[in-house]
Amino acid sequence: MSSNPSYSHYDIPCDMSNPKYQNSERSASISTTGSSSSIIPGTSGCDFRPLTSKKSADRYSCVLIIIAIFLACFCVALGTCVAILFSNLEHVRAQLQRASGDSVDRKVCLLCDELTMSPFEDENAATQKLEVTSDDNGDRVCCANDARQSKVMFDLLFKKKNKITCIEEVNAAQTACNRTLPGPVLTGRVSAHLHIGVQTPRNDHGDQPVRNWQSNYPTSHIEGINLTNDRLIINTTGLYVVYSQIYFSKYVPPTTPKSSSVLYHYVYRYNVIYPNTGNQLLMESVRTLKLVPVTSHSDHTSYTSATLRLKVGDEIYVKVSNISMVSRAEEASFLGVVQIA
């Protein structure tokens, strides 16, 4: 029985051709039979470090694979979350678009005349903050498309309704209303006589209001009545004589061909309680202007008057068809009101 085990049964990663290993083998072959605890031939000089390094590399590779799988799963989960987020954002955007579309459809529109409180356009500048269009009848329509415009519209509507209520109460009971009227109700003598000041045309064509009435002219006076924004404001209901004169004058160059044109002179009253924009024509005077080259000026005077019953809140004003032809002669153009009952 051989005491040397076969080397082929050991997977020893050693180079057996190495003289160090051969010497160890010969030493083992001449040794006496020993116990079963004798050392394995050639193991004393064999290097096991390559086997250990291989196992470490395999372990490191497994760790890397696990990390890669984890990162891949994380990326998939992250991509899914991003897709869900974008889907929700798109849904919210669609809802906002529908909401904005509904808000446009729900815009509030009123006739601009229901929001104005003056016969002069420049005093109704607040309506210009709204969207102004025209309807099929040619009437101006004011619309509110957002919260800011809605506030402007409802403020104007509230002020006008409040003024209408105030005037109606005063006309019904003849009591003072200090909420919206320009001044308190005055008793006693009521009259006014105003002279014209220099006019500034605001456009080239169309009827324009006469502005810049003077109450401090030597022959002017105002008593028991208010002059506000070139309008005489009636504070007491009663019977009045209303009169007005406008002096038209135009320089005629010698080379001007002979011709004629029509001049219009109107007296209006305005009150928020009246229908059809609140304006009512009280008097109208029509004059034909003849341009004669042989004279240096063409002059015409237009006078009109009437006895009228006026109400609290009535605002008396004058308009002409050609403001540029109104003479600067202060004493020649005037507006007056006298209460007789």
Image (cartoon, helix red, strand yellow):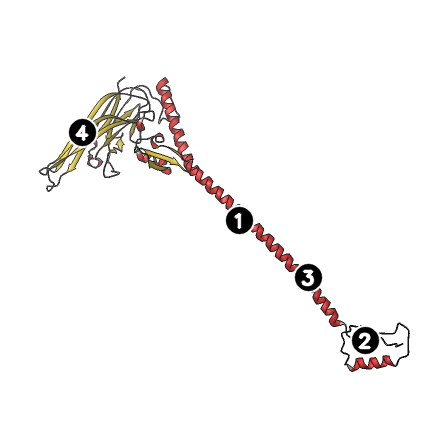
Q: For marks 2 and 3, give the CA distance.
A: 36 Å
Q: Give the mark nearest the N terminus, 2 or 4.
A: 2
Farthest residue toward the front? 1
SS at mark 4? strand
- Residue pointed to by mark 1: 86
In the foreground, 100 or 179: 100
Disc marking residue 7: 2
Name the amino acid type tagged 1: Phe
Disc marking residue 286: 4
- Residue pointed to by mark 3: 63
For the residues carrying marks 2 and 4, which lies nearer the camera in this image? 2
Q: Residues at badges 2 and 4 in contact (C-beta under 8 Å)?
A: no
Q: Is residue 18 above or below residue 308?
A: below
Quadrant of res 271: top left
Q: Where is the C terminus found, in terms of image quarters?
A: top left
Residue 104 in the image, given as x and y percentages of width and height: 42, 38
For the residues carrying marks 1 and 2, which lies nearer the camera in this image? 2
